[in-house]
Image (cartoon, helix red, strand yellow):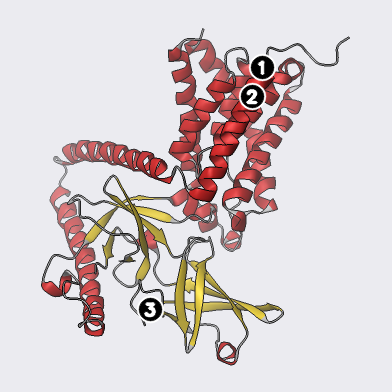
Amino acid sequence: MKLSHHFIIFITIFAGFWVDELISQFNVREYIHLANNLPYLIETCIGFLIFCYWVYAMPEKLHSSAALMHGLIIDLCFGSAVGFHMLFFVSISYIIHVYVFRFRIFSYLQLIIFFGAASVFYLACKYLIFFPTNYSYLLLIFSFLINAGAWLPIYFGMRSFRRTFIK
Amino acid sequence: MARTTPTFTPVGKYALAILVSLSLLISDINYQTFSSIRGFVQAAGIYSELLIDSFTTKITKFNSIYEDKKELIKVNKDLQNALLKLQNKIFLEKKSQVLANDLINLYDETLDLSQGKEAPVFKIASFGLKNYLCCSSHSLYLKNPKKLKVAVNLPVTNGDTFIGQTSSLDLNLIKVILFSDSAHILPVKIKNFFCNARGAGRPLLITCKVYKSSEFLKIQNNDPVFTSGLGGIFPRNIPIGKVIKINNSIVNESEITITLDANPLESNYFGVLVN
């Protein structure tokens, strides 16, 4: 794969993480009185899902080294410690590689559940490692619903993007 | 029929990549190995945001030249900024005077303000709003256009009270760790009771975990909380918040929850108490 394609892929992942940052700055608790004392409720994983999409769509072109490099740059720009996104990108990349042909026969619902669960596992590990005081099951449940719901728009959006820019 | 589908997954490479990333993660969490590099990248990101911001501001200004209220808005903004600066300056002068009185014989070259120098008041460059709202890592960056060499662990004020302390200097941006950060510990005094208040990891909250004592039993909700001065960083007897909850559910141990007076989201200018 060309270097420019890697660059385009990275730009989309970076944009995903940037959108995640923007969304997380919207504090829903300020607007709902009953939610004032609740912990943080929702965290989107759009950047992570976009990375998953690229590996899912082009497994033969994105290997461990690409996952490692993308993870390193994301760690430096958005992460709390170097290595976290590298580890998760490599792990999810491996899982998708191993089961890539099975995923092809999955229904959309099964894909939604798998990628929703993967993003929640990523979130749970992130909170347990870096912010254990803010860890809550409510956050995981709401985030699962949001991220699972986000998979299909990301899937179709990125597919049309891929067909336009990476041929 | 094969149970697993054929793939071209090089397992060894993945195992190696996982090992490398795991070792980097452990070394960074335990020893902060890459904190300076991360600080550098984050500061570079903030600078690029500021550049984009100034560019858009200039375009907006260009458009507003033809608007009638342009001058009025500018005067209003200048006055607001001057007021905020003045507020910080007065606060710093007051606190510096207190410190100077306390330590007059110990410091000859302390306190820029007491020597009539300019008060180091900095404008905010970036606020880690995401982590502030969701997570336990609370920090902000201050602009430092004059490239002053600001030391770490200096008190930072919003004009009314303290909000945190300087933590590092990344590409001339001053990183400030807030009281509510779970890694920050502030020695406080409530009536005659002293404790170390750790950031709760939630906005405007810090907590003290203490063993019950006779002094502790006198503490009630809404009691004012002051800096104790014991850490050697903050001057003593500065009001920083009040007690909002006392949790006695643990045997022999209690948790005092304190809400902070200063909301860092409400200020654009912050002063650093230099000594």
Q: Amino acid at mark 2?
A: Tyr
Q: Is residue A152 visible?
A: no
Q: Residue at x 22, y 84 (%)?
A: B101
Sequence-wise, the earlier of marks 3 and 2 is 2
Instruction: State left or right for residue B50 relative to residue A62.
Output: left
Q: Residues within 10 Å of mark 3 (few under 14, many from 20)?
A: some
Local SS, label 2: helix
Label disc, if present, on residue A22 of the rendered structure: none
The image quadrant of residue B50 is top left
Residue B11, placed above or below residue B6:
below
Label disc, if present, on residue B14 of the rendered structure: 2
The N terminus of chain B appears in which quarter of the rendering? top right
Instruction: State left or right for residue B140 relative to residue A51.
Output: left
Q: Residue at x 44, y 51 (%)?
A: B129
How many callouts does the rendering have?
Answer: 3
Label disc, if present, on residue B10 of the rendered structure: 1
Q: Amino acid at mark 1?
A: Pro
Q: Does the CB distance between marks 2 and 1 fall below 8 Å?
A: yes
Please report, as a chain letter, where disc 2 is located.
B
What residue is pinned by disc 3? Answer: B229
The image quadrant of residue B107 is bottom left
Q: Marks 2 and 1, Cα distance to the nearest angstrom?
A: 7 Å
Residue A142, horizontal then vertical, whole percent: 66, 46
Residue B124, horizontal then vertical, whole percent: 30, 54
